[in-house]
Image: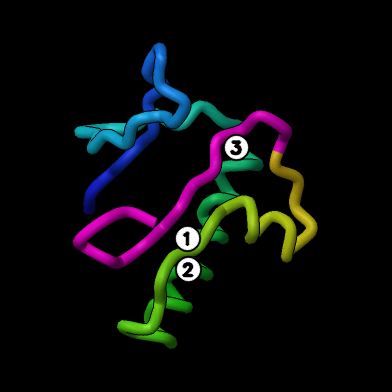
Amino acid sequence: MKLYGFEPVIGETEPSLRQLSQATIVTTSEQLRQIAQFLIRTAEAIDQHGSQFNHAHYRDFCKETNLIAPPGDADLIVTVKEDRPA
Protein backbone atom coordinates (compact mmCIF):
# COMPACT_ATOMS: atom_id res chain seq x y z
CA MET A 1 0.00 0.00 0.00
CA LYS A 2 1.19 3.47 -0.81
CA LEU A 3 -0.16 6.66 0.74
CA TYR A 4 -0.12 10.05 -0.94
CA GLY A 5 -1.22 13.47 0.21
CA PHE A 6 -1.24 17.06 -0.97
CA GLU A 7 0.90 19.56 0.84
CA PRO A 8 0.30 23.26 0.26
CA VAL A 9 3.48 25.09 -0.70
CA ILE A 10 3.72 28.83 -0.11
CA GLY A 11 3.89 30.71 -3.39
CA GLU A 12 2.51 27.86 -5.51
CA THR A 13 -1.05 27.86 -6.83
CA GLU A 14 -1.32 24.06 -6.81
CA PRO A 15 -0.56 21.94 -3.75
CA SER A 16 2.35 19.55 -4.07
CA LEU A 17 1.71 15.77 -4.13
CA ARG A 18 3.86 13.84 -1.67
CA GLN A 19 4.23 10.17 -0.81
CA LEU A 20 3.54 9.63 2.90
CA SER A 21 5.04 7.04 5.22
CA GLN A 22 1.97 7.16 7.45
CA ALA A 23 -1.34 8.96 7.81
CA THR A 24 -3.44 9.87 10.82
CA ILE A 25 -7.24 9.84 10.60
CA VAL A 26 -8.98 12.25 12.98
CA THR A 27 -12.63 11.22 12.95
CA THR A 28 -15.58 9.86 14.90
CA SER A 29 -16.49 6.20 15.32
CA GLU A 30 -19.55 6.77 13.10
CA GLN A 31 -17.53 8.28 10.28
CA LEU A 32 -14.88 5.57 10.64
CA ARG A 33 -17.62 2.96 10.05
CA GLN A 34 -18.68 4.91 6.94
CA ILE A 35 -15.09 4.86 5.70
CA ALA A 36 -14.99 1.10 6.31
CA GLN A 37 -18.17 0.69 4.23
CA PHE A 38 -16.55 2.76 1.47
CA LEU A 39 -13.41 0.61 1.52
CA ILE A 40 -15.44 -2.63 1.37
CA ARG A 41 -17.54 -1.32 -1.53
CA THR A 42 -14.38 -0.18 -3.31
CA ALA A 43 -12.72 -3.59 -2.82
CA GLU A 44 -15.81 -5.21 -4.36
CA ALA A 45 -15.62 -2.81 -7.33
CA ILE A 46 -11.93 -3.66 -7.81
CA ASP A 47 -12.78 -7.37 -7.78
CA GLN A 48 -15.62 -6.83 -10.25
CA HIS A 49 -13.84 -4.52 -12.70
CA GLY A 50 -10.26 -5.76 -12.40
CA SER A 51 -7.80 -3.76 -14.49
CA GLN A 52 -10.65 -1.52 -15.69
CA PHE A 53 -11.05 -0.06 -12.18
CA ASN A 54 -9.55 3.42 -12.04
CA HIS A 55 -10.29 5.07 -8.69
CA ALA A 56 -13.02 5.85 -6.16
CA HIS A 57 -13.63 8.92 -3.99
CA TYR A 58 -15.04 8.76 -0.46
CA ARG A 59 -16.96 12.02 -1.12
CA ASP A 60 -18.71 10.41 -4.12
CA PHE A 61 -19.60 7.40 -1.96
CA CYS A 62 -21.14 9.75 0.62
CA LYS A 63 -23.26 11.46 -2.04
CA GLU A 64 -24.40 8.14 -3.55
CA THR A 65 -25.39 6.68 -0.17
CA ASN A 66 -26.76 9.90 1.37
CA LEU A 67 -24.09 9.95 4.05
CA ILE A 68 -22.85 13.23 5.41
CA ALA A 69 -19.25 14.23 4.80
CA PRO A 70 -18.75 17.41 6.86
CA PRO A 71 -17.68 20.46 4.85
CA GLY A 72 -13.95 20.94 4.90
CA ASP A 73 -13.21 17.27 5.52
CA ALA A 74 -10.48 15.66 3.44
CA ASP A 75 -11.40 13.30 0.61
CA LEU A 76 -10.13 9.72 0.56
CA ILE A 77 -9.24 8.35 -2.88
CA VAL A 78 -8.50 4.70 -3.57
CA THR A 79 -6.73 3.52 -6.72
CA VAL A 80 -4.94 0.35 -7.76
CA LYS A 81 -2.68 1.96 -10.32
CA GLU A 82 0.97 1.77 -9.36
CA ASP A 83 2.29 4.52 -11.64
CA ARG A 84 0.50 7.46 -10.06
CA PRO A 85 -2.28 8.29 -7.61
CA ALA A 86 -5.75 9.32 -8.92
Residue 44 at what x, y percent from top left? 46, 77
Query: Do the CB atoms of the residues marked 2 and 3 lie less than 8 Å apart?
Result: no
Is 3 displayed left or right of 73 in the figure? left
Could you tell me which secondary element the residue under label 2 belongs to? helix
Majority secondary structure of magenta residues: loop
Marks 2/1: CA distance? Answer: 5 Å
Give me the residue at 27% from left, 34% from top.
18
Instruction: From the image, tell me which residue sits under label 2.
Output: 42
Q: Position of residue 45 (x, y in %)?
A: 47, 78
- The reply to whether discs 2 and 1 touch (Cβ–Cβ < 8 Å) is yes
| Dot placed on the residue nearer the N-terminal end, 2 or 3 | 3
Q: Residue at x 40, y 21 (%)?
A: 12
Q: Is residue 47 magenta?
A: no
Q: Amino acid at mark 1?
A: Leu
Where's residue 52, x and y in %?
Answer: 38, 83
Q: Element type at marker 1?
A: helix
Residue 51 sits in which quadrant? bottom left
Amino acid type at mark 3: Ser
Mark 3 or 1, closer to the camera = 1
Residue at (20%, 60%) from the top-left corner? 83
Q: CA distance from mark 3 to mark 1?
A: 15 Å
For the point 46% across and 52% down, which residue is it? Answer: 77
| Residue identifier under label 3 | 29
- Which disc, if any, is residue 39? 1
Instruction: Answer with the quarter of the image where residue 49 lies.
Output: bottom left
* 8 vs 67: above or below: above
Image-based side of 37 in relation to 55, left or right: right
Q: Position of residue 71 (x, y in %)?
A: 72, 33
Tell me where the magenta segment starts and ends, as one range.
70-86
Picture layout, residue 11 above or below residue 47: above
Q: Earlier in the sequence, mark 3 or mark 1?
A: 3
